[in-house]
Image (cartoon, grey):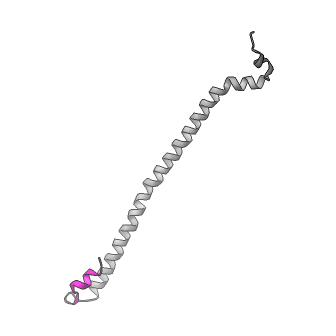
Amino acid sequence: MNHTAAEQVLPYWVRIVQALGPTIAGFATATIALAVALIAKRQWRTAHEKIPLNLFDRRFKVFNDTVEFHKFCFNQTWHEVELYDLNLFH
């Protein structure tokens, strides 16, 4: 076996780590890429699930405004409701 002087000085375990270095780096890169992909998917799912909640807030506000409008209208007769009163709900 032809070993260089540096290889003969290094302990056996260091030479094993050197030999496995590219393989370990490849696995580490793949593991990090997988973790990044999982985090991205979770962020996408969270954003996707948040959309109906945001719409709910807007829709609920419209619902409350409609209820208030109906309360206002049905507590008075129609001839008592003026155009100015209806503009309060915009």
Please identify the quarter of the rendering in which residue 51 is found: bottom left
x then y, percent, for residue 67: 33, 78
Is residue 86 rendered magenta in the image? yes
The image position of residue 28, as x and y in percent, is 61, 34
Q: Could you tell me which residue is drawn at 78 percent across and 22 percent down?
A: 12
Nearest the camera: 19 or 66? 19
Q: For the point 79% across and 17% down, which residue is it?
A: 8
Query: Magenta residues?
Result: 80-90
Q: Is residue 50 above or below residue 27?
A: below
Among all residues in the image, which is located at the extreme front? 5
Q: Nearer the viewer, residue 1 or 73?
A: 1
Question: Which residue is at a point 41% across and 63% down the rendered structure image?
Answer: 54
The quadrant of the rendering that contains the N terminus is top right
Q: Is residue 88 magenta?
A: yes
Q: Position of residue 36 (x, y in %)?
A: 54, 43
Going by the image, does 33 lie left or right of 47? right
Residue lying furthest top: 1
| 54 left or right, relative to 32 | left
Q: Residue at x 57, y 34 (%)?
A: 30
Number of on-image labels: 0
Q: Quadrant of the C terminus?
A: bottom left
Q: Position of residue 29 (x, y in %)?
A: 58, 34
The residue nearer to you, when weighing 38 against 73, is 38
Rendered image quadrant of residue 79? bottom left
